[in-house]
Amino acid sequence: MISVSQKNLLKLAEENEQKGDIETAIQNLEEALRSGRSNEIMLYLCRLYRKNNQGDRAYTLIKEEPDLFSDQQVYKEYCEILAANHFFIEALQLERLSGKKIPIKVEAASVEKQNLIMDLFKRQKNVTQWDYEQLLKLDLVNFKNFAQSLLLDPSQNFAVRLSLCEDLIRLRVKENIKIIILGEEEKFVPADTLLLEQSPIYKEIISGIGSKFRNNPSQLPMMLGEINLILGGLYPKLSSYVDETDSFTSDLISFLNTGNGRRHQKLFKKIYTYLPK
């Protein structure tokens, strides 16, 4: 339900747009959204962002939506934003996950732009979310090849490594991908691999941690943070390192609390030598 003040700001934005004052229209819509979420206002603001060559802001805004697919207007705007940003990889993921074409044609960036994106990415010491999103502008061949080179770099950013694996999974890539885990080269087939949070091993361990710290909620966030780092470091080969989730979870809690990982002590110490400092 749109409030009276939001309706007034929406009306002002429409008048601003009619006069060609897009910047002021955007400011009024941003102010309206600060008063409460509204699909009508959000969609209008996304459209104006695109019209004003601010596709990155439109992408950030629409990604705040909990459901991008049930409402056809929201879904269509989402696709328009992907096209405006040349986020070909994300559009292809949608098609491969749904098994059908999206309603808007999304093209990768030009070859020159793609080469620049990959070159700049390799130079980044601290990769931001925006930096990573630029990789979505690559075509499939460049994305797979570039992802492969990054996954074989032992110094690669932990979050980037995990994101690349999961993007390859969403793309349903069927060939073997090489990855360095704990200093060793491993292989996985993305099409045959589950996302981390869908992995039974991950879910069982997280559930075990939740049960263990049910009566000590203050300690739970710290424990979950450590667990996610550890499991993320072993992903996507969790089953190669976790033989039995109950003993792994129990030993891991002991390791984090006392430094004694019991049967898994050697593994935990090795994991921590490779985790980001």
Image (spheres, rainbow, N blue to C red):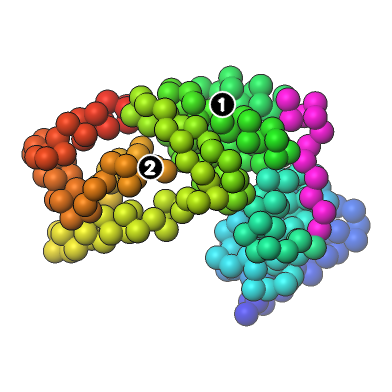
Nearer to us in this view, 127 or 4: 127
Element type where label 2 sits in the image: loop
Determine the residue located farthest toward the bottom in the rendered image. 1
183 sits to left or right of 162: left
- Amino acid, disc 1: Ser
- Amino acid, disc 2: Lys
Residue 239 locus on image (x, y percent): 33, 47
Nearer to us in this view, 141 or 26: 141
The span shown in magenta is 104-115
Q: Is residue 231 above or below residue 63?
A: above
Determine the residue located farthest toward the right in the rendered image. 19
The residue that mark 1 highlights is 149
Residue 79 locus on image (x, y percent): 74, 58
Q: Is residue 161 magenta?
A: no
145 sits to left or right of 155: right
Please identify the quadrant where the N terminus is shown. bottom right
Element type where label 1 sits in the image: helix
Q: CA distance from mark 2 to mark 1?
A: 18 Å
The residue that mark 2 highlights is 237
Is residue 228 at all visible to an observer of this figure? no
187 sits to left or right of 231: right
Q: Is residue 178 above or below residue 74?
A: above
Q: Is residue 256 above or below residue 47?
A: above
Label whose residue precedes the other's in the sequence (2 or 1): 1
Determine the residue located farthest toward the top in the rendered image. 123
Residue drawn at the location 56% of the way across and 31% of the way down: 148
Nearer to us in this view, 275 or 25: 275
Residue drawn at the location 74% of the way across and 70% of the way down: 73
Residue 241 locus on image (x, y percent): 28, 41
Q: Is residue 108 magenta?
A: yes
Give the number of the disc on residue 17. Answer: none
